[in-house]
Image: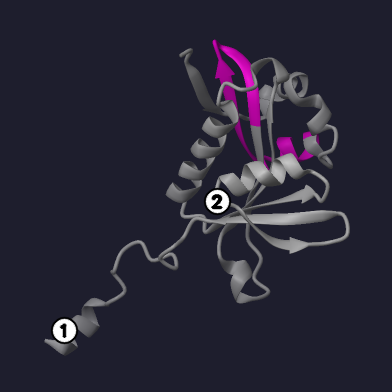
Amino acid sequence: MPKISIEMGNQEDLTELQMCAHEFIDFVDDFELNLRKEKYFILTAYYLKNLSGILLAEKQISKTDKLDTIIPKIRLIFIFVNPTYRRKFIAEKLLNSFIKIQRKRQVASVFIKLPRKYKKGKKYLKKHHFTQINTSKNEVTLERHLWYDFGLCLCDFIDDEIYNVLN
């Protein structure tokens, strides 16, 4: 099986990103501006050292208007694999690497908004543990929870002072 490598993308990759996925990038509002402002999380996939796929996400969402929005989330914008390299598990490798990185960063969930008619995309993401959480006239929102322990990584919430009082 040929080696697929996954790497972090950045603004220096702009030309390659546009060549690989121009039809998707054209639909992302202010892509170049936001790329320069480092608002994106990008993973690139290389198959036999050729750029073959891209995962684009908006960096961590941090709103504070209600409890469920202060939990760290990231918005997946798209996963694109060049048609020449499809059926080589590149999308799986991109998505799995993305999920693994977001768990390490203690992101609580990943969500994506898709056109309502994009049945293949919904089916693919549901296969990868995304669930539909919202539907509007033109789009659906899918989400994958990464925290199953309410975000508690360690049981270090007992302060030394409390510990001393109890002893």
Q: Secondary structure at mark 1?
A: helix
Q: Secondary structure at mark 2?
A: loop
Which residue is tagged 2? 129
Q: Taking 89 as reference, is 55 left or right? A: right
Determine whether 39 is above or below 1 in the image: below
Quadrant in which the C terminus is drawn: bottom left
Image: magenta residue range: 32-54
The answer to whether residue 50 is magenta is: yes
Which residue is tagged 1? 164
The answer to whether residue 57 is magenta is: no
**Which residue in the rendered view is the most extreme toward the right?**
137
Determine whether 149 is above or below 41 in the image: below
Q: Taking 49 as reference, is 26 left or right? A: right
Q: Position of residue 133 (x, y in %)?
A: 68, 63
Q: Taking 96 as reference, is 18 left or right? A: right
The residue under the point 51% across, 55% down is: 107
Disc 2 crowd rating (10 Å Cα; few below 14, some 14-19, many 20+) is few
Task: Name the foreground residue: 140 vs 157.
Answer: 140
Q: Position of residue 166 (x, y in %)?
A: 16, 88
Three-letter amino acid code at the position of disc 1: Asn
Disc 1 crowd rating (10 Å Cα; few below 14, some 14-19, many 20+) is few
Three-letter amino acid code at the position of disc 2: His
